[in-house]
Image (cartoon, coloured by chain):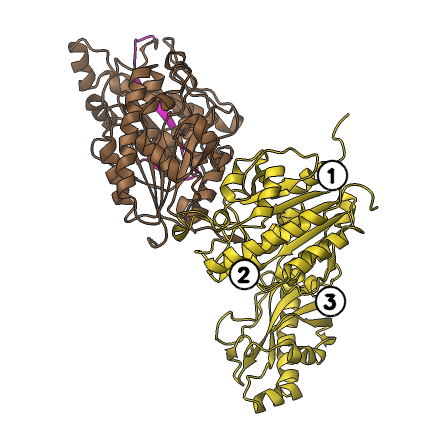
Chain colours: A brown, B yellow
Amino acid sequence: MTSGRKIMIVVMDGLGDRAVKSLGYRTPLQAANRPNLDWFAQNGASGCMDVIGPGIKPGSDTSHLAILGYDPEEVYTGRGPIEAAGVGLMGKQGDVAFRCNFATVNSSMDVLDRRAGRVRESDTSELIRALDGLEVNGFEAVVREGTEHRAVLLLHGEGLDPRVTDADPHEVAKVRRSEPLAPEARRTADAVNEFVRRSHQVLDAHPVNVRRRREGLPPANILLPRGGGRFPAITSFEERYGMTASCVAGVSLIRGICRICGLENINARGATGGVDTDMGSKALTALKELERKDLVLMNVKAADVVSHDGDLGRKLEVIERLDAMAGILRDGLPEGSVIAFCADHCTPVERMDHSGDPVPITIYSDDGLRDGTLSYDEVSCSRGSLGRIRGKDLMPILMDRADRSEKYGA
Amino acid sequence: MTSGRKIMIVVMDGLGDRAVKSLGYRTPLQAANRPNLDWFAQNGASGCMDVIGPGIKPGSDTSHLAILGYDPEEVYTGRGPIEAAGVGLMGKQGDVAFRCNFATVNSSMDVLDRRAGRVRESDTSELIRALDGLEVNGFEAVVREGTEHRAVLLLHGEGLDPRVTDADPHEVAKVRRSEPLAPEARRTADAVNEFVRRSHQVLDAHPVNVRRRREGLPPANILLPRGGGRFPAITSFEERYGMTASCVAGVSLIRGICRICGLENINARGATGGVDTDMGSKALTALKELERKDLVLMNVKAADVVSHDGDLGRKLEVIERLDAMAGILRDGLPEGSVIAFCADHCTPVERMDHSGDPVPITIYSDDGLRDGTLSYDEVSCSRGSLGRIRGKDLMPILMDRADRSEKYGA
């Protein structure tokens, strides 16, 4: 149904931060120009949000599950299935998925380069065609390329068990044999090892690698799986909330989370998942999608990327671009809709990694409480009328704001 | 025991609201004159309260259970037992109670009027005498009148099970057969159907209905049960908290909740449960009751009634009358007592139904923190020193404020 009030969730990945000495102990958000985000704070209700819980440092995967109202404890089974879903590969129950790297090995199975010289999709997509559909110890191996040197392996069949160790040594060392962590996973470990062996056999002599050697590039002559997980049993978003929903995100991991929860992934022209992404295009795409869906979640990764790089100056620029994007949303939001601006976690630019600090959140709807918070920043928002909430509270709050909640009682 | 500090909980039903455009995006509370409520906020500690949880829209029944410190998940078994308790009919464990409507049916069992022309107690109390005590398939049917066209049916005996569907079609349609939702409820469903059949047999020819037909009024010639539930196993309020307690409320549902929890219901002269209720009388009755009991809960329904009607102007008036009532309480509270002003849920006047927004709460005691909140309204209170609390936190907080809490530890 597309009647009823619409909901937009704008996740500005890694936006939150800590006090930076060179900014006079202000956060990048406090220091940047944010007129549009401030408008939403002044006309909306603000607070701070522990996406998982106080002091708990989320990954982008668990944080987005929480924001969508799923308990990561219950539905997070590992990175493999999420990466698979992110490249459009949805397994059936019982299937086990792994993240893989194309790597370079010598004849003694020493890993010389864990990323095969950062081999790219122009080569990997062809190499994958030689592996996809292989039969391995009675299981079917479905293989898809990801970005750059990455790929996804889905093992399909009866009796699979994800409790196996990684074949990827995570460093320059010998390829590891995958070992079962439980007796029931013996067959799966054997299949993983057989797949790795066959991948080397097939890839080493592949014309693409013959060409790469000739060009002085390291051959992508083995595929190393890690992070295996079973596809989780998840109640779809539409079934849980009675709303149709889409995701506008550039990053495969976020698209994978959303896909697994049953959201439709929408491509925005110029969305890269990186710093150079076209935020205006994403906003317009999201607004357009909101005409035909009840809820749209946007993720913009740029602030997280520059924070992982420790680049304060670029973080300030990115914030101002995010603010301009907020201006586009402000002009285009349908009447009666509910919009939330937040981050999925803080990524302090001086730490170059996520932190468990709460994130600033502002919720705006035309009839929502207006608490007069002057600025959209970590400190100002924390004094707002939402108080300190959890990620798992967000969907119930937004549903209720949009008059979509069921009454508990009479 | 009536030594020790007293506690008063003033539940202003449905008081909270959202931003109303015609009030310049203020809430009705923000816009109204509230000098006495403001006095409590300025001299007390304020916050906002999620009665059930963030974004969860409560009914008045589940909300009052939470406010009294009971977990609705554990003790809420449906509307039937609560309505029964509300009219003074307490079942034993195993009994199943239903809410009923007197209705008008034709000979084909089509429901022509679900309320028998809004038949009133002057007629229903007589009709009920013809039904009360009927023996139905080995069970005893106890029947009591409620307000207007309403009644309560209590089935008493061994082997009852509340998991049966309603006989009331909830619209103008044929009377439904009650069906069991579980095999164990087969006998109960049969008893409900037999009761419905007998009610029609008895009522259709009743002198009251002969007279009604003659006067051109629809006959109240059948009683339709719905919302069946078992009486819950509840630890009484006095046993849980070591305090004697009373409830001053006009509305049968609230009286029922309180009765089920073991509070004594006290009648206040002029208390109607409607907009025209005598709030001054209720306040004086509550203060008097506080001389002989440790805790009194007051519920004033008026704000909820006008909000369900969508009447903004009257909501502003009602708030000012509630404020005058707060003035009476301010003058009459015993020394050392603890008083809390809150709502059981918000009822936004433009939505004409409950919402899951948090409610404003102010707690005053002479030695309680004074956080200088200027006004008793949703936004101002949310900035107060109580922060954002849950309904289930209220009784522990009030008990502790009144120096009645047990130490946890050494």
Within the magenta stretch, is there residue A105?
Answer: yes
User: In the image, what residue type sits under mark 2?
Assistant: Val
Q: Which of marks 3 and 2 is in front?
A: 2
User: In the image, what residue type sits under mark 1?
Assistant: Ala
As drawn, the label of residue B402 is: 1
As drawn, the label of residue B305 is: 2
Measure how far apart labels 3 and 2 are at the Cα level: 34 Å
* Residue for badge 3: B156
Residue B317 visible: yes
Report how many numbered discs are placed on residues in the image. Answer: 3
Q: Residues within 10 Å of mark 3 (few under 14, many from 20)?
A: many
Q: Compare residues A237 and A157 and report the one nearer the observer.
A: A237
For numbered disc 1, what is the local secondary structure?
loop
Measure how far apart labels 2 and 1 are at the Cα level: 32 Å
The residue depicted at 55 percent of the width and 85 percent of the height is B217
Q: Compare residues B34 and B399 and report the one nearer the observer.
A: B34
Tell me the magenta residue range.
Answer: A89-108
Rendered position, B216 above or below B363: below
Q: Which of marks 1 and 3 is nearer the N terminus?
A: 3
Q: Tell me residue A143's x, y (percent).
A: 30, 29
Q: Tell me residue A289's x, y (percent).
A: 27, 44
View extreme (bottom): residue: B214
Residue A50 visible: no
Q: Which of marks 2 and 1 is nearer the N terminus?
A: 2
Given the image, what chain letter belongs to the residue carrying mark 1? Answer: B
Q: Compare residues B91 and B254 and report the one nearer the observer.
A: B254
For numbered disc 2, what is the local secondary structure?
helix
